[in-house]
Amino acid sequence: MRRAAIVLALSCAAFAGGCGGSEETPSQSAETTPAPAEATVADGAVRVAMKDFKFVPEDVEVEAGQTITWVNEDTAQHDAVADEGEGPRSELFNQGESYSWTAETAGTIPYVCTVHPGMEGTITVR
């Protein structure tokens, strides 16, 4: 019994000693700031992802005549509908599907997903 207690004590000491590291811990942690979300532009078209129940990016700037394409990356259906006047007016579409709209007139156009409150974006047409 005494021998078992000694072996157990030595095993615990060896285990505890192995838990410490020889590497130094930095005194200051490095902070990273995520880059602001920007619309992807390809062939003159601007891409807006519908992801995690948000438009990414929420705000886009385009020139008149430029096309914006919304791509649904969520499992839920989404749409992109201007609050009023000129702007996107999509039907609901599924994951992997997309909708495109071409900006015609300069101005600011707020838009939403009509089925998900708080999912909002703004298009600024120059």
Image (cartoon, rainbow, N blue to C red):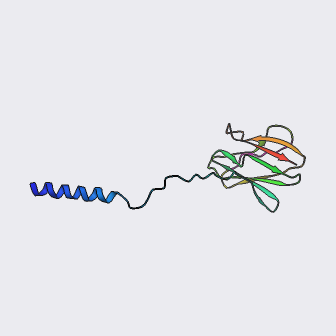
Which residue is painted at 86% across and 42% down in the image? 86
Answer above or below: position of 70 versus 84: below
The reply to whether the magenta stretch includes residue 88 is yes
Placement of 82 over or under 32, stated as above or below: above
The quarter of the displayed image where residue 116 is located:
top right
Could you tell me residue 96's position as x and y percent? 67, 55
Q: Is residue 77 magenta?
A: no
Residue 52 relative to residue 99: left or right:
left
Q: Tell me which secondary structure the magenta stretch mostly adopts.
A: loop
Q: Residue at x 80, y 45 (%)?
A: 123
Front residue (pair 37, 86): 37
Position in image of residue 120 (x %, y %): 72, 41
Give whichever of 71, 126 is nearer the camera: 126
Residue 88 visible in the picture: no
Q: Is residue 96 visible?
A: yes
What span is colored magenta in the figure? Answer: 86-93
Q: Quadrant of residue 19?
A: bottom left
Q: Residue 95: x and y, percent?
A: 65, 52
Q: Is residue 19 left or right of residue 49?
A: left
Q: Position of residue 64 (x, y in %)?
A: 89, 51
Closer to the camera in the image, 46 or 36 = 36
Q: Residue furthest right?
A: 105
What quarter of the picture does the N terminus occupy?
Answer: bottom left
**Residue at 82% from the left image edge and 54% from the top image edge:** 67
